[in-house]
């Protein structure tokens, strides 16, 4: 799986990054997973995290819009310079969208800019990030490997 952070200064006071993933080729279903993001705490202050997929707002399996296959993401920002997120799948056989070789923009994280002369240093915490795939109706059976990480270290200047 390829995990990508694509950052940009969206206004002179705000830095945001799209969080994207792409599968390793064969189709698989995401299970319970956790990811950690690190950032320059001297230059940025956590503002928000919005999930487009793998959350309680994504009813891709139930076209009538009533049933989500994931709970709301559990977000922890109590450690300075770290955002940790846990994704919990409750309907493993219906997990969607499926991971394929197509890139999925699944979330967006935003920060208040505290130092516009610094860099974001936004990156994946490789040690603590883990994604699992569901197999049939089983939860958390197989880790998705290998994981390839693409970080974002943007200048925070307003241009």
Image: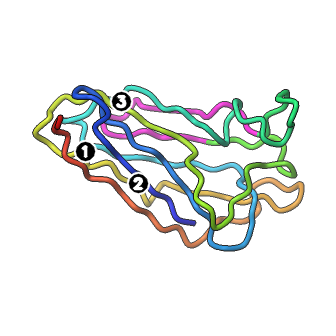
Q: What residue lies at 75% left-to-right and 57% top-to-bottom?
A: 29
- Quarter of the view holding residue 25: bottom right
- Label annotation for residue 80: none
> Badges 3 and 2: C-beta atoms under 8 Å apart?
no
Residue under circle 3? 46
The quadrant of the rendering that contains the C terminus is: top left
Q: Position of residue 128 (x, y in %)?
A: 48, 54
- Quarter of the view holding residue 56: top right
Q: What is the distance, in whole Å, between disc 1 and disc 2 at their CAs?
A: 14 Å
Q: What is the distance, in whole Å, between disc 3 and disc 2 at their CAs?
A: 16 Å
Residue under circle 2? 125
Q: What residue lies at 32% left-to-right and 34% top-to-bottom?
A: 10
Residue under circle 1? 120
Above or below for 65 versus 82: above
Callout 2 crowding tier (Cα within 10 Å): few <14, some 14–19, many ≥20: some
Q: Position of residue 117 (x, y in %)?
A: 10, 39
């Amino acid at each position: 799986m390829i995990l990508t952070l694509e950052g940009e200064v969206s206004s002179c006071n705000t830095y945001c990054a799209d969080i994207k993933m792409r599968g390793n080729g064969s189709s698989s279903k995401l299970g319970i997973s956790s990811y950690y993001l690190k950032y320059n705490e001297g230059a940025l202050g956590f503002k928000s995290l919005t999930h487009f997929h793998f959350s309680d707002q994504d009813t891709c399996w139930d076209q009538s819009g009533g049933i989500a296959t994931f709970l709301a993401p559990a977000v922890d920002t109590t450690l300075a310079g770290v955002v940790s997120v846990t994704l919990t799948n409750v309907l493993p056989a219906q997990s969607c969208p499926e991971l394929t070789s197509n890139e999925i923009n699944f979330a967006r994280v935003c920060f208040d800019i505290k130092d516009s002369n610094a860099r974001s240093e936004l990156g994946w915490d490789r040690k603590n990030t883990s994604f699992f795939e569901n197999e049939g109706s089983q939860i958390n059976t197989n880790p998705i490997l290998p994981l390839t990480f693409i970080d974002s270290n943007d200048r925070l200047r307003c241009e």
